């Protein structure tokens, strides 16, 4: 994408507008598909300009005869708007005064044709209003990595806000979202854990570490299907534990 690391910016004493990055829209945006077996590029297409920090999943589209016709790749896309970098600076986060300043984001869906076409497409996978036009830190059922899938779990927005402040379940088939919100709290990246023996994609629990308005923290467990919890599904965290944006689940 046109947002690229800049070694020169890293060496400067004073912060630059985009910190360690530079924006080069004149160079356009491209998506490349590489064969895992040979390492060769099998498709390279120009796509609309975009800004993303996290991809969600990618899978092959096939025709009735089983031939791959396209690659679909989903990401948390910020509408090619680099202001997200400034908005997430520590100074701006600490100076929040109730205004709605979080830049819009969406589930961006790339479609990369495998027929030699020069151009691919990028569009919203669902109406961004479903998740408050906030979208970042996505995860899915890991059994569906690289496969066609239906559900994603992410941090969305309940506005006004200056940071993603909801947990969101995205249904990419029905193009709907379910949202969980605790006023004044900030959730970490949601992590889906499948129920042992599950046969449905969303049969499991979603775990997130929550920083609440009082500076305390707790872990919330939501039903992966209904996306609801109850009082027993909130587990207080010891003061020595600090929540972070990224999570990992270790099976016992």
Image (cartoon, rainbow, N blue to C red):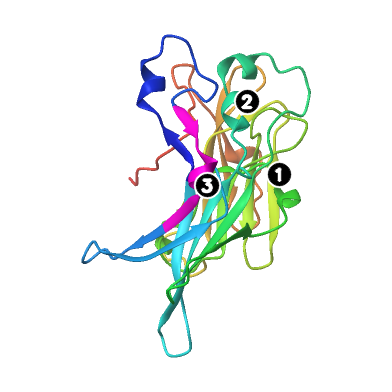
At x 47%, y 72%, the residue is 117
Q: Which residue is mark 2?
A: 87
Q: Which one is earlier in the sequence, the residue at label 2 or at label 3?
A: 2
What's the distance in space between the residues labelled 1 and 3, CA to CA? Answer: 14 Å
At x 70%, y 33%, the residue is 182
Secondary element at image label 1: loop
Question: Residue furthest toward the top?
Answer: 13
- In which quadrant is the C terminus drawn? top left
What's the distance in space between the residues labelled 2 and 3, CA to CA? Answer: 20 Å
Secondary element at image label 2: helix
Figure check: 182 above or below 51: above
Q: Residues within 10 Å of mark 2 (few under 14, many from 20)?
A: some
Q: Residues within 10 Å of mark 1 (few under 14, many from 20)?
A: many
Tell me where residue 85 appears, x and y as whole percent. 56, 28
Tell me where residue 110 appears, x and y as whole percent. 53, 60
* Magenta span: 21-31
In the drawing, does residue 223 fall left or right of residue 73?
right
CB under 8 Å between callouts 1 and 3? no
Q: Which residue is mark 3?
A: 138
CB under 8 Å between callouts 2 and 3? no
Q: Which residue is mark 1?
A: 133
Quarter location, residue 34: bottom left
Circle nearer the viewer, 1 or 2: 2
Question: Residue furthest toward the left?
Answer: 38
Circle nearer the viewer, 1 or 3: 1
Q: Is residue 25 magenta?
A: yes
Secondary element at image label 3: strand
Q: Is residue 102 magenta?
A: no
Residue 76 visible here: yes
């Amino acid at each position: 994408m046109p947002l690229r690391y800049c070694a020169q910016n890293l060496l400067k004493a004073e912060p630059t507008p985009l910190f360690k990055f530079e924006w080069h829209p004149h160079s356009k945006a491209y998506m490349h598909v590489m064969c895992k077996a040979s390492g060769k590029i099998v498709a390279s297409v120009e796509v609309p300009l975009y800004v993303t920090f996290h991809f969600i999943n990618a899978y092959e589209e096939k025709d009735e005869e089983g031939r791959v016709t396209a690659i679909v790749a989903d990401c948390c896309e910020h509408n090619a708007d680099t202001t997200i970098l400034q908005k997430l600076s520590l100074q701006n986060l600490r100076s929040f005064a109730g205004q709605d300043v979080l830049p819009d984001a969406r589930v961006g869906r790339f479609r990369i044709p495998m027929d030699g076409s020069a151009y691919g497409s990028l569009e919203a996978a669902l109406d961004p209003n479903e998740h408050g036009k906030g979208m970042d830190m996505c995860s899915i059922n890991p059994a569906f990595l690289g496969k066609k899938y239906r559900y994603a779990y992410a941090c969305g927005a309940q506005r006004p806000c200056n940071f993603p402040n909801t947990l969101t379940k995205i249904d990419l088939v029905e193009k709907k979202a379910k949202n969980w919100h605790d006023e004044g709290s900030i959730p970490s990246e949601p992590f889906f854990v499948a129920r042992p023996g599950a046969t449905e994609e969303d049969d499991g629990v979603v775990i997130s570490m929550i920083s609440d308005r009082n500076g305390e923290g707790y872990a919330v467990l939501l039903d992966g299907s209904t996306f609801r919890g109850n009082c027993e599904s909130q587990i207080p965290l010891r003061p020595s534990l600090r929540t972070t944006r990224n999570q990992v689940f270790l099976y016992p």
